[in-house]
Image (tube, rainbow, N blue to C red):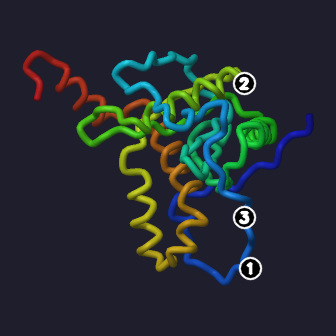
């Protein structure tokens, strides 16, 4: 297998540069969820409280990770650097069928020699899971059965809102925001996950130790 091209490291600000004139492209059909991991019509998934939550192997701390922002109509993809310090947005993908969705995810896994997946988990601001959380967990379980690499489910609260605010500040139109939203949400999600695994700096570690002590904050 040939070595995949190295994506240029990009911060979120660099990725969301001001809009330029682009050619209009026609996207594929926006179809309902694939049959393998979507609820049957008129038959909702179990509520988060009763659905059995699968525990996946944790992604390794070296090697590329693929971030996935899950949606009913689109999937956003982002990739990390091999040292897991920077994430970059790579694609907004319009979902078609479960077979084609899986093919596209496998394409990115093979292209970048991915070692693990990070999938966004929608959670209410009060910390409780939602019905969409159940969809995401079922999607992750379906992926693990077909691809078999480690998966992390990561809190995606506010990621989309953060991206929308940045795009509005950069004067993107609604149409331009739609073209970038999902992959940038995946980038923010993956970046958040990478940061959560970094060792604490001196002052942060001291504060954490104080909070954990009996007379802490």
Question: Do callouts 3 and 2 mark residues in contact (Cβ within 8 Å)?
Answer: no
Which class describes the residues within 10 Å of circle 2: few (<14), some (14-19), or many (20+)? few
Q: Residue 52: horizontal and vertical position, in percent?
A: 45, 16
Q: Distance between the residues labelled 1 and 2?
A: 36 Å
Mark 2 falls on what kind of element? helix
The residue sitting at 38% across, 26% down in the picture is 48
> Which of disc 2 and disc 1 is earlier in sequence?
1
Q: Residue 102: horizontal and vertical position, in percent?
A: 73, 37
The quarter of the picture where residue 70 lies is top right
Question: Do callouts 1 and 3 mark residues in contact (Cβ within 8 Å)?
Answer: no
Q: Residue 14: horizontal and vertical position, in percent?
A: 56, 65
| View extreme (left): residue | 215
Question: Do callouts 1 and 2 mark residues in contact (Cβ within 8 Å)?
Answer: no
Residue hosting label 2: 146
Residue hosting label 1: 23
The residue sitting at 70% across, 56% down in the picture is 8
Decide which of 205, 11 is in the foreground and name it: 11
Res. 197 in view: no
Question: Which of pointers 1 and 3 indicates the residue nearer the eye?
Answer: 3
Mark 3 falls on what kind of element? loop
Query: Where, quadrant-wise, is the N terminus in this rendering?
Result: top right
Decide which of 96, 193 is in the foreground and name it: 96
> Which of disc 2 and disc 3 is earlier in sequence?
3
Mark 1 falls on what kind of element? loop
Q: Residue 31: horizontal and vertical position, in percent?
A: 66, 52
Residue hosting label 3: 27
Which class describes the residues within 10 Å of circle 1: few (<14), some (14-19), or many (20+)? few
Query: Where, quadrant-wise, is the C terminus in this rendering?
Result: top left
Res. 65 in view: yes
14 vs 158, left or right, is right
The quarter of the picture where residue 100 lies is top right
Q: How far apart are marks 3 and 2 (CA)?
A: 26 Å
């Amino acid at each position: 297998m040939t070595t995949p091209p190295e994506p240029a490291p990009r911060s979120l600000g660099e990725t969301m540069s001001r809009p330029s004139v682009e050619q209009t492209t026609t996207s594929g059909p926006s179809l309902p969820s694939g049959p393998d991991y979507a609820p049957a019509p008129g038959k909702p998934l179990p509520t988060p409280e009763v659905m059995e939550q699968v525990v996946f192997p944790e992604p390794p701390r070296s090697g590329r990770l693929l971030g996935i922002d899950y949606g009913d109509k689109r999937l956003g993809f982002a990739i990390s650097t091999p040292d897991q310090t920077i994430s970059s947005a790579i694609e907004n993908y319009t979902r078609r069928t479960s077979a084609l969705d899986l093919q596209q995810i496998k394409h990115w896994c093979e292209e970048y020699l991915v070692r693990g997946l990070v999938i966004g988990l929608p959670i209410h601001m009060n910390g409780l899971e939602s019905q969409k959380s159940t969809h995401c967990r079922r999607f992750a379980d379906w992926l693990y059965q077909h691809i078999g690499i480690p998966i992390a489910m990561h809190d995606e609260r506010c990621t989309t809102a953060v991206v929308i605010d940045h795009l509005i500040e950069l004067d993107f139109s609604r149409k331009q925001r739609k073209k970038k939203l999902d992959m940038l949400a995946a980038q923010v999600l993956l970046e958040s996950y990478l940061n959560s695994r970094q060792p604490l700096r001196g002052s942060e570690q001291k504060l954490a130790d104080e909070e954990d002590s009996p007379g802490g904050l």
